[in-house]
Amino acid sequence: MVAIRSRDLSRTHRERLLKSGFLKDVIKGWYIAAGPDEAPGDSTPWYASFWEFCAAYLDERFGEEWCLSPEQSLSLHAGNRTVPAQLLVRTPRGGNKPTPLLHGTSVFDVRNAMPAEHLVAKWDGLRLYSVAAALVAVSTQFFRRSPTDVRAAMATIKDASDVLALLLMGGHSTIAGRLAGAFRNVGRPRLADEIVKTMQTAGYAVRERDPFEDRPGIVLATQSASPYVNRIRLMWEAMRECVLKVFPVPPKRPHEPGPYLKAVEAIYVTDAYNSLSIEGYRVSPELIERVRSGAWSPDRNPDDRGNRNALAARGYYDAFISVRSSVEKVLGGRNAGDVSRDDHAEWYRRLFGPSVTAGVIRPVDLAGYRGGPVHIRRSMHVPPPREAVRDCMPALFDLLEGEAEPAVRVVLGHFTFVYIHPYMDGNGRIGRFLMNVMLASGGYPWTIIPLERRDDTMDALESASVKLNIRPFAAFLGGLVEAGLRD
């Protein structure tokens, strides 16, 4: 249970849990679970609880007489689970005012009619407009403001029937022209023609208008494709030109891999120190060197058997050796996307192998992609659910394999990997390994993200994930790579 009401607990229990830090106030009479070791002001528990809390809270207030706005509904149908600053809710019992929640978020209940019950879709306890009903209800401005969400949601429409039923029932000739133009924009002319011709047959004059400001350069999958996959493909297409504008031009790929690989080996200790420290491990160059030298193992160093820092350092070295082998394949001419598709599971297994051997984590944790939800610390971005990960990861490697520009592979490969967050742990480290394999594919040097730039990294990734603004992240990585090229 994520949302906890006052009446669910006795006064004594409630006061004890609040005092001990196991409960956090959201609004009067409502709480979420918390950890007593959480830092003051940490937004992670709230962002992780947001959608489930709102579902329970709105059910309690309005019963079944509520529905999220058409715009928010389309975003969720499109796989965009970002926590909004203000959640708009339609209900005939609304007070037309916001209810402040935690960390600058709020719920605004608008007094308005709801769609008919058969046009309401259920999603993780939330009540949404169906895709067809939302497309009819949203304004032209939303098509322009959130084209990625709209296009990904449109791809889930299999035929014109549901949309046409709403258009004909309401006599919506203007909206019919807008939707016909929208479907033609995304490469579905038959559906667009069906809307126009059917409305005209019913006696309506339809003037087709494209509500989008541009045209996508890809054709979206419409047959049982995950909306998360289409969203990732649309983001990639929309972001790649920006990356090319701000990222350094790739140097020539080295003819001989030997010197490149020697340079990679030479900076290993610095790379491991920064990458592990970014993830919160307390390591030193001395520990990292001791692990690399082979003078360390859980059996030889029993004091380190339960030491998560030493085990992480050993796992990082084992994974690094595997990644170095992947880089060698890429320098030898193999497609970087294909290599990463084949090898990334081995990077993950080696990263956590020592912890399994030492009994710190379970063998089942090496099974592969996560089997549950995961949340990124202090981020409003909510990664795709576990079942979507199985669709998203092959799509990522398809994009990497088919991408002609090394700079795009570097920036969007790293960004999309951490956007999906396919593992319960290790996503940052493996994302940086993936980035460096892509850097090698363009002849760029192996690049370290410094510990002191951690906040810059997270801020740039947040901008890309939540606002779909890739420029800060591309410029940030580009600056590091540029410095490496000068050295």
Image: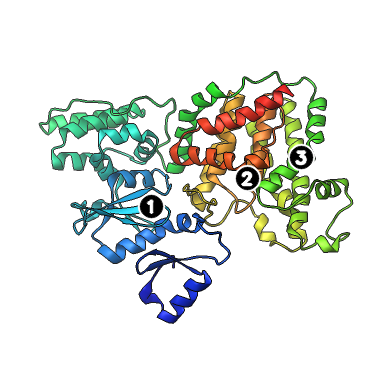
Instruction: Please name the amino acid that badge 2 sits on.
Output: Gly
Q: Residue 90: x and y, percent?
A: 24, 52
**Chain-order first, disc 1 or disc 2:** 1
Q: Residue 175: x and y, percent?
A: 20, 34
- Image quarter (top left, top right, bottom left or bottom right) of the N terminus: bottom left
Instruction: Judge from the rendering whether residue 374 lies leftward or rightward of residue 217; answer left or right.
Output: right
Q: CA distance from mark 3 to mark 2?
A: 16 Å
Instruction: Establish if 303 lies above or below 161.
Output: below
Look at the numbered disc 3 and give the secondary structure of its residue.
Answer: helix
Is the residue under label 2 in contact with that under label 1 (CB below 8 Å)? no
**Chain-order first, disc 3 or disc 2:** 3
Instruction: Establish if 315 lies above or below 204.
Output: below
Q: Is disc 2 surrounded by few (<14), some (14 to 19) or many (20+) residues within 10 Å?
A: some
| Residue underneath mark 2 | 428
| Residue underneath mark 3 | 270
Is the residue under label 2 in contact with that under label 3 (CB below 8 Å)? no
Out of 251 and 456, give the one closest to the viewer.
456
Q: Residue 418: x and y, percent?
A: 57, 43
Count the marks: 3
Look at the numbered disc 1 and give the secondary structure of its residue.
Answer: loop
Tell me the quarter of the picture where residue 319 sits: top right
Instruction: Please name the amino acid that badge 3 sits on.
Output: Thr
Q: Residue 35: x and y, percent?
A: 54, 65
The answer to whether one can see residue 140 in this image is yes
Out of 138 and 222, give the one closest to the viewer.
138
Q: Is disc 3 surrounded by few (<14), some (14 to 19) or many (20+) residues within 10 Å?
A: some
Q: Is disc 1 surrounded by few (<14), some (14 to 19) or many (20+) residues within 10 Å?
A: some
Out of 30 and 257, give the one closest to the viewer.
30
Look at the numbered disc 2 and give the secondary structure of its residue.
Answer: helix
| Residue underneath mark 1 | 105
| Residue drawn at x 26%, y 33% as measured from the top left | 140
